[in-house]
Amino acid sequence: MKTLNQAAVGETVTVSKLLGEGPTKRRIMDMGITKGVGIYIRKVAPLGDPMELTVRGYELSLRKADAEMIEIQ
Protein backbone atom coordinates (compact mmCIF):
# COMPACT_ATOMS: atom_id res chain seq x y z
CA MET A 1 0.00 0.00 0.00
CA LYS A 2 1.42 3.36 -1.06
CA THR A 3 0.01 6.65 0.20
CA LEU A 4 0.16 10.11 -1.35
CA ASN A 5 2.85 11.38 1.03
CA GLN A 6 5.23 8.72 -0.40
CA ALA A 7 4.87 10.01 -3.99
CA ALA A 8 7.73 11.97 -5.56
CA VAL A 9 7.60 15.59 -6.71
CA GLY A 10 6.71 15.77 -10.41
CA GLU A 11 4.86 12.46 -10.31
CA THR A 12 1.23 12.02 -11.40
CA VAL A 13 -0.64 9.39 -9.40
CA THR A 14 -4.17 7.97 -9.35
CA VAL A 15 -6.23 7.70 -6.18
CA SER A 16 -7.23 4.09 -5.49
CA LYS A 17 -8.88 4.50 -2.08
CA LEU A 18 -9.57 7.04 0.66
CA LEU A 19 -8.70 5.87 4.15
CA GLY A 20 -9.92 7.52 7.34
CA GLU A 21 -13.41 8.41 8.47
CA GLY A 22 -15.68 11.29 9.34
CA PRO A 23 -14.78 14.96 8.90
CA THR A 24 -11.26 14.29 7.63
CA LYS A 25 -12.50 12.06 4.81
CA ARG A 26 -15.25 14.58 4.01
CA ARG A 27 -12.69 17.43 3.82
CA ILE A 28 -10.53 15.43 1.40
CA MET A 29 -13.56 14.63 -0.77
CA ASP A 30 -14.64 18.31 -0.71
CA MET A 31 -11.27 19.15 -2.32
CA GLY A 32 -12.26 16.98 -5.27
CA ILE A 33 -10.01 14.08 -4.30
CA THR A 34 -11.99 10.90 -4.94
CA LYS A 35 -11.28 7.40 -6.24
CA GLY A 36 -9.88 7.39 -9.78
CA VAL A 37 -8.76 11.04 -9.78
CA GLY A 38 -5.29 11.93 -11.05
CA ILE A 39 -3.10 14.03 -8.73
CA TYR A 40 0.06 15.83 -9.84
CA ILE A 41 2.57 16.59 -7.07
CA ARG A 42 3.96 20.08 -7.81
CA LYS A 43 6.00 20.78 -4.71
CA VAL A 44 6.62 19.52 -1.18
CA ALA A 45 7.80 21.84 1.60
CA PRO A 46 11.27 21.07 3.03
CA LEU A 47 9.84 19.24 6.03
CA GLY A 48 7.16 17.53 3.92
CA ASP A 49 4.27 19.67 5.11
CA PRO A 50 2.35 20.96 3.20
CA MET A 51 2.24 19.31 -0.21
CA GLU A 52 1.30 21.44 -3.22
CA LEU A 53 -0.92 19.47 -5.64
CA THR A 54 -2.86 19.92 -8.85
CA VAL A 55 -6.22 18.11 -8.79
CA ARG A 56 -8.81 18.48 -11.59
CA GLY A 57 -7.04 21.63 -12.80
CA TYR A 58 -7.04 23.27 -9.36
CA GLU A 59 -3.96 23.99 -7.25
CA LEU A 60 -4.33 22.70 -3.70
CA SER A 61 -2.26 22.60 -0.54
CA LEU A 62 -2.63 19.43 1.52
CA ARG A 63 -1.32 18.62 4.99
CA LYS A 64 0.93 15.60 5.37
CA ALA A 65 -1.52 13.96 7.82
CA ASP A 66 -4.28 14.19 5.19
CA ALA A 67 -1.95 12.86 2.46
CA GLU A 68 -1.39 9.72 4.55
CA MET A 69 -5.11 8.94 4.20
CA ILE A 70 -5.02 8.84 0.38
CA GLU A 71 -4.01 5.47 -1.06
CA ILE A 72 -2.54 5.70 -4.56
CA GLN A 73 -1.55 3.44 -7.45
Image (cartoon, rainbow, N blue to C red):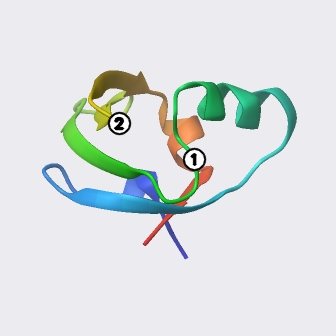
The quarter of the rendered structure image containing the C terminus is: bottom left
Number of the label disc, if any, that sits on residue 25:
none
Q: Looking at numbered disc 1 in the image, what kind of residue is underneath it?
A: Thr
Q: Is residue 7 visible in this depiction of the protein?
A: no
Farthest residue to the bottom: give it: 1
> Residue shown at 67%/25% (left/top)?
27
Q: Secondary structure at mark 2?
A: strand
Q: Nearer the viewer, residue 43 or 57?
A: 57
Which quadrant does the N terminus fall into?
A: bottom right
Height in image: 11 above or below 47?
A: below
| Residue 43: quadrant of the picture | top left
Residue at the spot of label 1:
34
* Mark 2, residue position: 55
**Which is nearer the eye, 9 or 16?**
16
Where is residue 39? Give x, y as percent. Answer: 33, 47
Q: Nearer the viewer, residue 53 or 48?
A: 53
Answer few, some or many: residues within 10 Å of disc 2's Cα (few below 14, many 20 plus, some between 14 and 19): some
Give left or right: position of 17 versus 32. Answer: right
Q: Secondary structure at mark 1?
A: loop
Q: Give the left or right position of residue 10, taking residue 20 as reference.
A: left
What residue is at 71 percent from the left and 55 percent from the top?
A: 19
